[in-house]
Image (cartoon, rainbow, N blue to C red):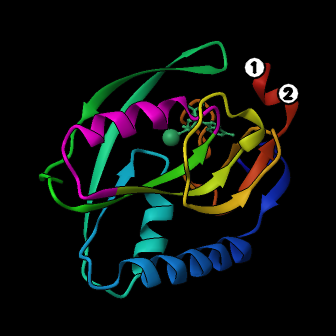
């Protein structure tokens, strides 16, 4: 697997530091508010595991599996819910936990979907952000790291469902995309 990686983009050490920084900000904002963290499957799983364990206050955790239809390499924003939340979010403070935001289309659709469930508030925490590729406007309160327009894999991020188990974030060799 590691032979397919051209270069490391974010080391395991840096990921830890990013999670610590974000956890401090989120703790300041949410301590005592009993928020619900909603992880978007499957990419957010490692980030949710690390971030949530740094948050020392009462919360609940839920997951949403929403698949976004892609036309070529672009997501369409047409999202289908493969598995829904297990508990109501009505009147709850929601923090969406996401691996990466690219065009923003997927998250915008998910935001609209969750807003219909009448939460008290919704904010977004993403490990990575590629703002250069944004095509719809969304406000992202907690950004771990801004990255350039390169396709990232590892630490939950996949290419064709592979590489999610890589412990750091890397860039794939060109030849892998051509297989
Ligand atoms: P968006 O709707 O264009 O913002 O697409 C967001 C989704 O595309 C993310 O949740 C990822 O699943 C996927 N994605 C976007 N960029 C990358 C990347 O660099 N590596 C892996 N997945 C990505
Ligand atoms: Mg994703």
**Pointer 2 with pointer 1, Cβ within 8 A:** yes
- At label 2, counting other C-alpha atoms closer than 10 Å, the crowd grade (few under 14, some 14-19, many 20 or more) is few
Task: Quickly name the residue at label 2.
Answer: 175
Q: Residue at x 67, y 20 (%)?
A: 73
Q: Residue furthest top?
A: 71
Q: Residue furthest bottom?
A: 56
Up/down of 142 relative to 138, above or below: below
The CA span between labels 2 and 1 is: 7 Å
Image-quadrant location for residue 131: top right
Circle 1 sits in a helix, a strand or a loop, which is it? loop
Circle 2 sits in a helix, a strand or a loop, which is it? helix
Could you tell me how many numbered marks the image carries? 2
Up/down of 176 relative to 145, above or below: above
Please state the horizontal and vertical placement of residue 79, each as a whole percent of the image: 39, 24
Which segment did they paint magenta?
102-121
In this image, 175 relative to 138: left or right?
right
Up/down of 172 relative to 22, above or below: above
In front of the other: 55 or 13: 55
Please state the horizontal and vertical placement of residue 25, each as a whole percent of the image: 53, 79
Task: Quickly name the residue at label 1.
Answer: 179
Please state the horizontal and vertical placement of residue 47, each as a whole percent of the image: 51, 63
In this image, 26 relative to 10: left or right?
left
In front of the other: 33 or 54: 33
Q: Can residue 54 be seen at all in this image of the molecule?
A: no
Q: Residue at x 12, y 53 (%)?
A: 87
Residue 128 on the magenta span: no
């Amino acid at each position: 697997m590691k032979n397919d990686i051209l270069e490391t983009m974010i080391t395991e050490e840096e990921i830890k530091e990013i999670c610590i920084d974000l956890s401090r900000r989120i703790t300041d904002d949410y301590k005592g508010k009993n928020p619900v963290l909603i992880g978007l499957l499957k990419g957010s799983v490692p980030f949710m595991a690390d971030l949530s364990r740094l948050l020392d206050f009462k919360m609940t955790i839920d997951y949403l599996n929403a698949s976004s239809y892609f036309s070529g390499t672009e997501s369409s924003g047409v999202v289908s819910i493969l598995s829904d939340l297990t508990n109501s979010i009505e009147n709850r403070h929601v923090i969406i936990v996401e691996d990466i935001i690219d065009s923003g289309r997927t998250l915008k659709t998910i935001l609209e979907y969750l807003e219909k469930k009448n939460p008290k508030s919704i904010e977004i925490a993403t490990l990575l952000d590629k703002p250069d590729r944004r095509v719809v406007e969304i406000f992202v309160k907690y950004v771990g790291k801004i990255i350039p327009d390169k396709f990232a894999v590892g630490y939950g991020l996949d290419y064709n469902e592979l590489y999610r188990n890589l412990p750091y974030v890397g860039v794939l060799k060109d030849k892998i995309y051509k297989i």
